[in-house]
Image (spheres, rainbow, N blue to C red):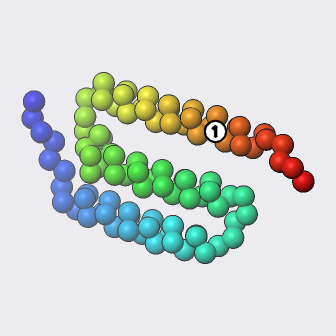
Amino acid sequence: MAEHVVPKKIYVAVWGTLMAMTLVTTLVAFVDLGRFNTVVALAIATFKASLVVLFFMGAKYTPRLTRVVITCGIFWLALLLAFSLADYLTRLWPA
């Protein structure tokens, strides 16, 4: 099986995007978004992780079965986060 060669400019563009998103993460940390601080932080982290997995780990150019396994792992993580947040948000906290 032939390997897929990714041009260096793609890696540089992805690296630049990751650095920019790191700056955005730092700047957003100083903004009070109330209950949405965690949501915004997780959204930025998910975007950055997606770039790393797709380009630096080569998942964009892998066979279909590998993509299915990655998608199932992401789905499982989403389920765990959803159930954990559902538990946390429905607790009755003492006043």
Q: Is residue 5 left or right of residue 81?
A: left
In the image, residue 60 lies at what x, y percent?
Answer: 30, 41
In this rendering, position of residue 88 left or right of residue 12: right
Q: Position of residue 78 (x, y in %)?
A: 54, 37
Q: Where does the N terminus fall, quadrant-wise?
A: top left
Residue nearer the viewer, 78 or 21? 78
> Disc 1 designates what residue?
84
Residue 49, position in %: x, y?
A: 41, 51
- Left or right: where 82 falls relative to 52: right
Residue drawn at point x = 70 percent, y = 65 percent = 33
Is 19 above or below relative to 11? below
Q: Identify the image quadrant of residue 2.
A: top left
The residue type indicated by label 1 comes to Ser
Residue at left offset 18%, top offset 55%: 7
In the rendered image, residue 44, in percent from the top left (x then y), is placed at 51, 57
Q: Residue placed farthest to the right in the image?
A: 95
Q: Write the residue at 40% across / 48% down.
A: 50
User: Would you place residue 76 above or below residue 40 in this image?
Assistant: above
Q: Is residue 93 left or right of residue 38?
A: right
Near-viewer residue (9 or 56): 56
Q: Is residue 22 above or below residue 73?
A: below
14 lies above or below 54: below
> What residue appears at the point 30 percent right and 24 percent down from the top-left corner?
65
| Local SS, label 1 | helix
View extreme (front): residue: 94
> The C terminus lies in which quarter of the figure?
bottom right
How many discs mark residues in the rendered view?
A: 1
Quarter of the rendering containing residue 34: bottom right
Other-residue count near label 1 (Cα within 10 Å), few / some / many at <14 / 14–19 / ≥20? few
